[in-house]
Amino acid sequence: MEEGGRRGIPSLLNSSSSDEHIATDITQLVGWTPLIELNRIVRKDGVNARIVGKLESYQPLCSVKDRSALRMIEDAEEKGLISPGVTTLVEPTSGNLGIGVAYNALLKGYRFVAVMPAEYSLDKQMLLTYLGAEVILTGKDVKHKSLGQLDKVEQIKNDMPNVHHLDQFKNAANPEAHFVWTGPEIWKDTAGKVDIFVAGSGTGGTISGVGKYLKMKNPAVKVICVEPAESPVISGGKPSRHKIQGMGPGFVPKNLDISIVDEIITVTAQDAMANAKRLAREEGLLVGISSGANLAACLKVASRKEYEGKMIVTIFPSGGERYMNSDLFAQAREECSAMTF
């Protein structure tokens, strides 16, 4: 068992300097990721709190979903629910969880079918296909993306033999990955100084697992949930389509533990993309749209007088390269398309 907060790369470095520090399997690299303080943005905005981001793009397949994908598959194997060469794994995904499942399926010998909305990033569709997954798209005419995906999953289960739906929205192994791995990493690397944890909710796995762990260590830690302003379901509003990929599925997932959430902040897709661009231009951090949403929420919190001097920790769930065909890169695409020589 790895030292608390040190699964992944650090666990390979615990032995003496004379030993080899070589991973024998890519799953051994899933785990610890670095924290970075956003000094430039904080200074420019004149806030008096500390904002720290956890860079999940350092995972082997570049997103926080590598954690839950690995843990859900391991859990299903431990329970005897799936068998390599026999079971077909199926999962609705905004792309990142599917990519995490795809490489595990390759390593372990499972067929994998990913179901995702047609309008989501072409980059993710290409990566899934490149990793050997079968990609099934749901149409843009479906009112709520995630509900359309779940309907398609049910159809696949009825049409194909030996299908196992990992079910990231309900599977307890999803938040467990963050309670056992991500939460302890944050606690250890902040030396227990984290005061506020801010995270968006897609499946609810990250915020519930990390939030539960941090409150166990210090009940005074505040947990703030971020959701799209265009689809504020957790806040009691109506679901609607939006452009913050990986966040706001249009319903309140079973894995979202509302009891540990102290506050909900809504962020527009426009603000999310603007702040993702700020992270790139001002901090040199190439991250995705949901990372921008998390930063937008952090800045709202940091501007409050009662949080002066406090440490706010958030998650940057994925790298920006995965969104080059999305609206996040629309301006850059237009400028590059107009270039001549």
Image (spheres, rainbow, N blue to C red):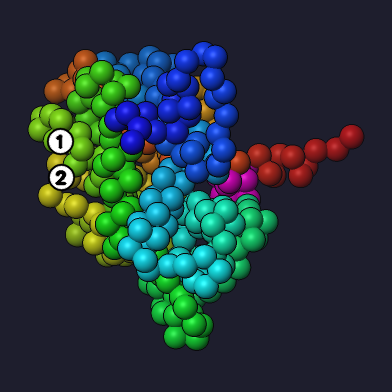
- Check disc 2 and give the amino acid type: Ile
Residue at the spot 52% in from the left edge and 65% down from the top edge? 84
Magenta residues, dominant SS class:
helix
Residue most toward the left?
219
The image shows residue 83 at horizontal and vertical percentages of 47, 67
How many neighbours does mark 1 have within 10 angstroms: few (below 14), some (14-19), or many (20 or more)?
some
Magenta stretch: includes residue 324: yes
Residue at the spot 43% in from the left edge and 53% down from the top edge? 69
Q: Quadrant of the N terminus?
A: top left
Label 1 element class: helix
The image shows residue 31 at horizontal and vertical percentages of 42, 36
How many neighbours does mark 2 have within 10 angstroms: few (below 14), some (14-19), or many (20 or more)?
many
Reading the image, the residue beneath label 2 is 260
- Check disc 1 and give the amino acid type: Lys
Which residues are the magenta region? Answer: 322-331
Q: Are marks 1 and 2 in contact (CB under 8 Å)?
A: yes
- Classify residue 118 by image quadrant: bottom right
Reading the image, the residue beneath label 1 is 215
Q: Quadrant of the C terminus?
A: top right
